[in-house]
Image (cartoon, helix red, strand yellow):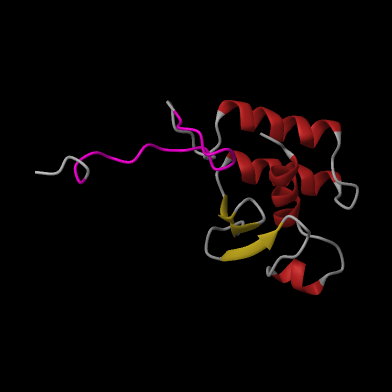
Amino acid sequence: MSTAATTPHPTRCLKCRRVLRNPSADGLGPKCRRMVRKAARVSPPAAYKPYQLAKAVELLEMGGLVPLRTNRVFLVVSDDGTEIYRTAATGQCNCPAGLRATSPCYHSAAAALLATATA
């Protein structure tokens, strides 16, 4: 009898892939969460407005950002939770605000914050 089928996989940090002792809603470990918050306070991206950065930090804290490929492309949940968008740390997003391209959306701000926080 194989024990691999009955043993659950450990929960890992979405940023650095370390095993989490206490899984959190945002999917980040304590060190990565601290680095993301510090990046938002110390050197926020200049292209984003303060309210977008606040929504981006809230999105990260709620676990609404899931990396697809090595912290460059992410799946993001919409405000009401009914839609899922793809966004990149470089500012592209397929949400309605990102497609209009009048200004970058907060989804891409969250991706940029997560990508700039180095582990």
Residue toward you, 99 or 1: 1
Give the residue furthest to the bottom.
100
What residue is shown at x 86% (from left), y 63% (from top)? 103
Q: Magenta part of the protein: which range?
A: 5-20
User: Residue 23, located in which quarter of the rendered image?
Assistant: top left
In the rendered image, residue 49, in percent from the top left (x then y), is placed at 86, 49
For this orientation, the residue located farthest to the front is 2
Q: Which residue occupies 70% across, 48% down? A: 110
| Left or right of residue 87, residue 116 in this image | right
Using the image, determine if residue 42 lies above or below residue 66.
above
* Residue 15 vertical position relative to residue 95 in the rendered view, above or below: above
Asked if the magenta segment contains residue 7, the reply would be yes
For image coordinates 63% across by 64% down, the residue present is 86
* Front position in the image: 97 or 80: 97
> Which quadrant is the N terminus positioned in?
top left
- Check residue 17 for magenta coloring: yes
Location of residue 44 by image quarter: top right
81 is higher (above) or lower (below) than 54: below
- Specify the farthest residue to the right: 46
